[in-house]
Image: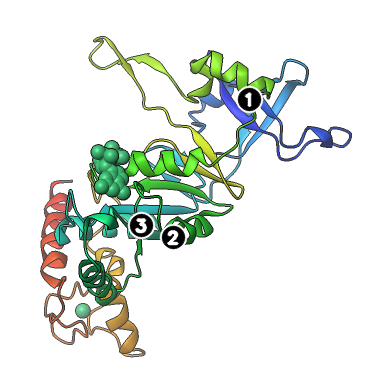
Amino acid sequence: ANFMRVIVDAAAPGLEHHRGSDLLCVVRALLKKIRRRVLVGDRVLVGAVDWTDRRGMIEDVFERRSEVADPPVANVDRLVVLFSLDQPRPEPATLTRFLVEAESTGIPFVLVFNKVELVDEQTIAYWRDRLKSWGYDPLFLSVDKQSGFTALEEMLEGQTTVVVGPSGVGKSSLINALRCNQNISEEDPIHKLLEQNSKWFGEQRVGTVSKKSGKGKHTTRHVSLLPIPGQGFLADTPGFNQPSLMKVTKKSLAETFPEIRKMLKENEPSKCLFNDCVHLGERGCVVKGDWERYPYYLQMLDEIKIREEIQ
Ligand code: GDP
Ligand code: ZN
């Protein structure tokens, strides 16, 4: 059976003292039958609890505030979009793709630049100003030198966070740095139990045989939420290495660019003449083309148009 670790945050009268403890739970067969997937981060209703053995059964899943597909986590409060100032250097096109993908989730995010110790002050100022002109206010830090963490840690307090970004920028290093400040009680019996059996710790470690091909075993991606200082949680698996833009439509792309949002706002109450304006210089369009990232907007619009035509 696949176990999920559930932290108790409310219990029936008389059982309140169990708040904060954890239970190893199986998912009720009926939920699987009606294809209600339980994601890490979900708020769930647990029944059939054995408080001595700390076991239970997930009987229902509450409505989600948000959902990230890669990695699969529910109720995410914040994304950290991580880049590095060097090794690798930020690429404006890649940066834009990640920012658009992050914007399209509707989840608040913070842009963070890592490896500050590899560059000089001027380079930092250059990126700060450039991102400001795009409409962003990034944080700068070094995971290696453990510098610049305070602002980030304050921002993540009490939140469930997923780190995303291209490879090599230090996502895994950042996740490790944030988690190791944590004093996990080695004495906690369930912690020992979880350590002894990794199958239980890796919530959602599921081995299935692919039905389509009938070929071999493939293991679905599993993810765990790690406690971080200040009551928050951090997904142990970083997300969208390759932004797919699947949630972005021809119409919604413009909303993912702060520059366009600003131009539209400045022109209120008048709008673009056509309701379905995609700001390609249509008659009566209030969005001008004289800003740095306009060419990226056009490229991505083309890409999305092609995708929508194929579908
Ligand atoms: P990921 O692919 O985004 O998960 O990146 P990793 O965490 O695997 O880090 C990629 C490389 O960058 C590793 O060699 C890290 O040691 C290095 N790295 C991470 N943070 C820093 C940093 O703050 N400064 C420097 N110079 N290197 C770093
Ligand atoms: Zn327009």
Q: Mark 1 points at which residue?
A: 186
Mark found first going from the N terminus, 3 or 2: 2
Q: What residue type is labelled 2?
A: Pro
The figure's colour scheme reads: rainbow
Mark 1: secondary structure = loop
Q: Circle 2 sits in a helix, a strand or a loop, which is it?
A: loop
9 with respect to 303 (left or right): right
- Identified at 19% across, 53% down, the residue is 86
Q: Can residue 165 be seen in this view?
A: no
Classify mark 1 as within 8 Å of ligand 1 or not, answering yes or no: no
Numbered circle sitting on residue 108: 2
Within-10-Å neighbours for mark 3: few <14, some 14–19, many 20+: many
Q: Is the C-beta separation of discs 1 and 3 under 8 Å? A: no
Question: Crowdedness of circle 1 by 10 Å Cα count: few (<14), some, many (20+)?
Answer: few
Using the image as rendered, state which of residue 195 and residue 123 is in the foreground: 123
Q: Is residue 100 visible?
A: yes
Q: Distance between the residues labelled 3 and 2?
A: 20 Å
Secondary element type, mark 3 = loop
Q: Nearer the viewer, mark 3 or mark 2?
A: 3
Q: Position of residue 181 (x, y in %)?
A: 53, 42
Q: Which amino acid does label 1 sit on?
A: Glu
Q: Nearer the viewer, residue 104 or 306?
A: 104
The residue positioned 42% from the left and 19% from the top of the image is: 206
The label on residue 141 is 3
Q: Quadrant of ligand 2?
A: bottom left
